[in-house]
Image (cartoon, rainbow, N blue to C red):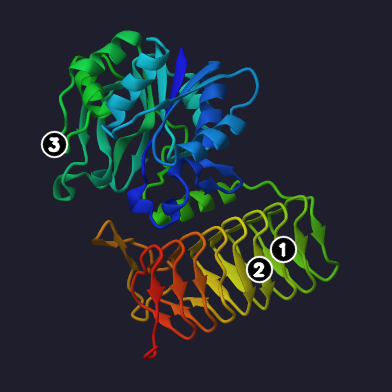
Amino acid sequence: MKIVLLAAGQGERLRPITETRPKPLLPVVDEPVGCRQLRMALEATGAREVVVVYSYLGDQVKKVLSGCAGGGVELHFVSQGDPLGTGHAVLKAVEATGLDDVLVVYSDVYLASSAVEAVRSMKPPSILVGVTRTPWEYGVVKVEDGLVVGLEEKPPRERAPEKAHVFIGVAMLRAEDVEGLRSIKPSPRGEYELTDLLASLASRGELAAVELPEPEAWRDIGRPWDLLIANRMELDKLEPRVRGEVHPTAVIEGPVVVEEGATIGPHTVVEGPAYIGPGALVGPNAHIRPYTVIHGKAKVGFASEVKASILLEDARAPHLNYVGDSIVGEHVNLGAGTITANVRFDRKSVKMTVKGIRVDTGLRKLGAVIGGYAQTGINVSIMPGVKIGSYALVYPGCVVDRDVPRGGVFKCGGR
């Protein structure tokens, strides 16, 4: 058996954070989600051959996944070329490396660590299923006596059940099943979908369903707020450790990780669960509130407060900043006094524009999503649900109430 890791998606709905990194490399606490999925698959199956199918920002994918595969693994990288769907990606993998039984793993789904146990019990052909309360967003699976008896991709919301089993991106297939991918027809969007093959197997009574031990302990990372939620789910299981330098006047409360090389400065408060990455600098007089992840070499400086947010590598909130329920991309610099508002004035759930469509996130608290290398001037206020593209500039004193495109310049006050 070989593992086929699907890592070719462009992550358009995750922009702007995927403008500078592919979605398999989005971090869940201290590890890219693609590495988590690969590690899970290797542990569950004992397989030693892995095929990674890549496309978008492929050099990053190859560099990072090569480093997290571990020793003794035969690792192949196969370019998908044209993005023609998940079924096409699996076929490309076996055409390049030989037909075999495969464990197909999507690289953009967060699974709790208990998924290893479930995947270990899978026999081909079978799929891993979880439970969701938004089934219209996924492939809904009807299960009877451990067999899949129906699979419908993204049913209309008005007739979808309130809670349902769904396919969560892990499928174990026989070599003959993989061959069957050659006979599936293109979907309405012109792609060859793995779920069409799964539906065909189910119609013949051949497809088993294996449920997660914790049925709701998973998250498809498809939109920016999904990344925040996946990180919060993982932080709930955080085992505290302190390897960096913590000033004697600093206060650490609850489960907190301070990695080697990180510094917690004087009179700083860190409330767990929280993760402070290697080389990060926090303080003096900073406040890190629960469910915050601060990555390597990021800085949270004097009188800055970060709550339930992700700061990626080398991001800076150095002076008098408030970052709430937000994602701040790598190498972003927030000018002194930059504030992310995370609650609407009318207290309604926050909306965000995804691929040109206004989407209700269902979250009452959600701040900004700021792409890598963007910069704000002093005294900038960013409204809830606003996205600022990578390499964008926001002039001092502005209230940012609409999205800013990649490389865009947001001016205000007649400038």
Determine whether the residue tagged by mark 2 lies in a helix, strand or loop: strand
Disc 2 marks which amino acid?
A: Val
In front of the other: 311 or 74: 74
Label 1 environment density (alpha carbons within 10 Å; few <14, some 14–19, many ≥20): many
Tags 3 and 2 in contact by the CB under 8 Å rule? Answer: no
Work out which residue is located at the far right of the displayed protein and give it: 248
Q: Is residue 63 left or right of residue 24?
A: right
In front of the other: 80 or 321: 80
Q: Is residue 270 left or right of residue 214?
A: right
Q: Tally the numbered discs.
A: 3
Tags 1 and 2 in contact by the CB under 8 Å rule? Answer: yes
Query: Is residue 297 visible in this depiction of the protein?
Result: yes
Label 2 environment density (alpha carbons within 10 Å; few <14, some 14–19, many ≥20): many
Label 3 environment density (alpha carbons within 10 Å; few <14, some 14–19, many ≥20): few
Residue 76 placement (x, y as % from top left): 49, 21
- Which residue is under mark 1? 281
Disc 3 marks which amino acid?
A: Pro
> Which residue is drawn at the image coordinates 19% and 20% (left, top)?
200
Residue 6: image tag: none
First along the sequence among labels 3 and 2: 3
Picture quadrant of residue 80: top left
Q: Calculate the distance from the C-alpha at mark 3 to the C-alpha at mark 2.
A: 47 Å
Determine whether the residue tagged by mark 1 lies in a helix, strand or loop: strand
In front of the other: 216 or 306: 306
Q: Calculate the distance from the C-alpha at mark 1 to the C-alpha at mark 2.
A: 6 Å
Picture quadrant of residue 399: bottom left
- Which residue is under mark 2? 300
Residue 412 placement (x, y as % from top left): 39, 85
Residue 73 placement (x, y as % from top left): 59, 19
